Image: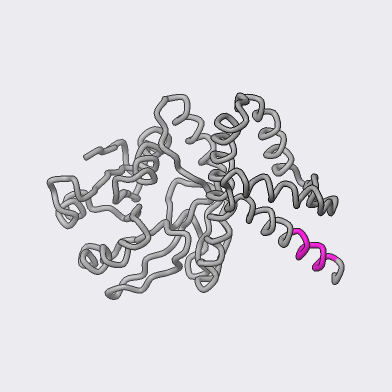
Amino acid sequence: MTQNMTLAPTERILVVGNGRLATFLQGFLNETLSRIPSQNWSRSHLISFHDSVRLFSPTHLWLCLSDDSIETFCLENARSFHGRTVVHFAGAKGCLELAGHTIYPAHPLMSFPSTTSAEEKRAQQVRFKNVSFAVSPRQPVLQKLLPGLDNPSFVIEDDLRPLYHAYCALVGNLTVLLWEEIESRWQRRLGADIQHLDTFKNQIFEMLSMKRDHSILTGPIARGDVETLRRHKQALTESGDPGLSALIDISADLYSGRLAHEERF
């Protein structure tokens, strides 16, 4: 069990879990917010959760648990929640009312991949200071949930949380998966070094980061080049990639829908 016992604000944080988010948050507390006493607890510890809470007496419980296990954990351990602020980090869940306690959401709009080098960990901690959190209108003040953090936050209504998280997952997961698949095929099927994609990839993400009032989309979809799109689909299907071929249709439909919306408004 890790512990940080420097003096002495009123807040005391118990980070619950042993996954990537819990590991990151405990490291961030230790290295960046050392003025706030903190501990970590997970099921791998010999001491029980109830005993950990009794001995450490935290004011805040940060539940870094899988989405499917949050409710079960809360119902099993609700007797240790009394008088404490309990926070979960699941993007698709809003405020939870369980066993007479409210568990508030605070979802960080950031991915937490495994990091190995000290340099990567430092870079991740620097980025984290600017990460926005999605909170509930029932407790919109982030600092009351996550003391010591001055991050920006925004309110998402509880009934919109699944839609909000679906958007996050699409732009995060699909982007990563698509680049990983293309890089793999780039080498295996084209025999080209993936380093040649670096400038192209960086340009795309730099353009996405710019403030703009127009689409940055280029290429055959933006041009309406139907014949080129047909040839792309045929080549992908013949190479054994019908899933990637279907993405062309999905992309074209998304772009067509956007154009139709812009024409209406």
> Does residue 21 show up magenta in the picture?
no
The N terminus lies in which quarter of the figure? top left
Which residue appears farthest toward the front when viewing the image? 238
> Does residue 261 show up magenta in the picture?
yes
Q: Nearer the viewer, residue 80 or 252?
A: 252
User: Residue at 27% of width from left, 45% of height from top?
Assistant: 40
User: Residue at 39% of width from left, 32% of height from top?
Assistant: 31
Does residue 187 sit above or below 86 in this rendering?
above
Q: How many numbered dots are placed on residues in this image?
A: 0
Can you give x and y, in whole percent of width and height, for residue 184 in the image? 54, 35
Can you give x and y, in whole percent of width and height, for residue 43 in the image? 20, 50
Query: Horizontally, is 66 left or right of 165 in the view?
Result: left
Visible in this render: residue 213?
A: no
Secondary structure mostly taken by the magenta-highlighted segment of the chain: helix
Can you give x and y, in whole percent of width and height, for residue 154 in the image? 58, 59
Query: Horizontally, is 98 left or right of 32 in the view?
Result: left
Does residue 112 sit above or below 59 in this rendering?
above
User: Residue at 17% of width from left, 50% of height from top?
Assistant: 55
Can you give x and y, in whole percent of width and height, for residue 37 in the image? 31, 42
Q: Which residues are magenta?
A: 255-262
